[in-house]
Amino acid sequence: MYRLLTIIIRIFVAIPVMVATWLVSFFALELSYLYASGLALIGAGLAYWLISVIIYFRFLKKNELKIREYRYIHKNLLEANSKIRRMQRALLSIRHLTFLKEMMELIRITRKIYQVTKKEPKRFYQGEKFYFSHLDSAVELTEKYALLSTQPNKSSEVEQVLYDTRHTIKEMKIIIEKDLYHILSDDLEQLQFEIDFAKHSKK
């Protein structure tokens, strides 16, 4: 939503600049239609780029990040998004309905962590265990389970491995839930403070 809004802002700035540049070039400077149109496009492109730069640096300032830090976080977020998509694809192979519900909940939590971090990149540092360890484990376990569950003739050994994997993934879901709470800990503390303050005010 934020990205769409910034694109709309850029377009709304670029179009008037393009029109104004063309009018000045064609009527005031008496350039040919072709040259005026070319200058108008260049002006619109520069305006679009300038607004993009301003929005980018305001975003960095708001999140108290340096360019290098944000690039590092952005790179890791792209990798995390790819891993979450792999988990979603693995869901298509799961036929165990009860466990499928567990997996959908796990993916919902991972996506929530991703979305919170994407919106506020500085929170990435609070979720490093998730991004560098827990997410990788969840993806590996999910893909392993999906692969084994599609085997036509499952031996008792395979069934045992599937059972153990389901149990481990459930434990991993609890760990990742804790990751989410840790990332949101500042918000939870602030909310608790406001609740306590409201109760005190009533007294």
Image (cartoon, rainbow, N blue to C red):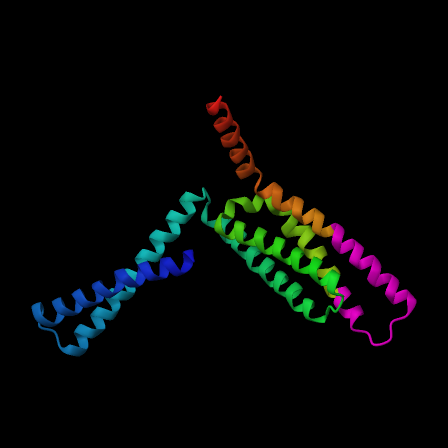
Q: Does the magenta stretch include residue 115?
A: no
Tell whether 36 sits left or right of 28.
right
Q: Determine which quarter of the picture holds residue 13.
A: bottom left
Q: Determine which quarter of the picture holds residue 94.
A: bottom right
Tell whether 173 sits left or right of 19.
right
Tell whether 156 sits left or right of 47.
right
Pick the residue in front: 135 or 32.
135
Q: What stretch is highlighted in magenta?
A: 144-171
**Residue 19 image point, x, y percent:** 19, 67
Pick the residue in front: 10 or 29.
10
Looking at the image, residue 203 lies above or below residue 151: above
State how many labels appear. Answer: 0
Which SS type dominates the magenta stretch?
Answer: helix
What residue is rendered at 45% in x and 49% in y? 67
What residue is rendered at 51% in x and 48% in y? 121
The outermost residue toward the right is 156
**Residue 60 image point, x, y percent:** 42, 47
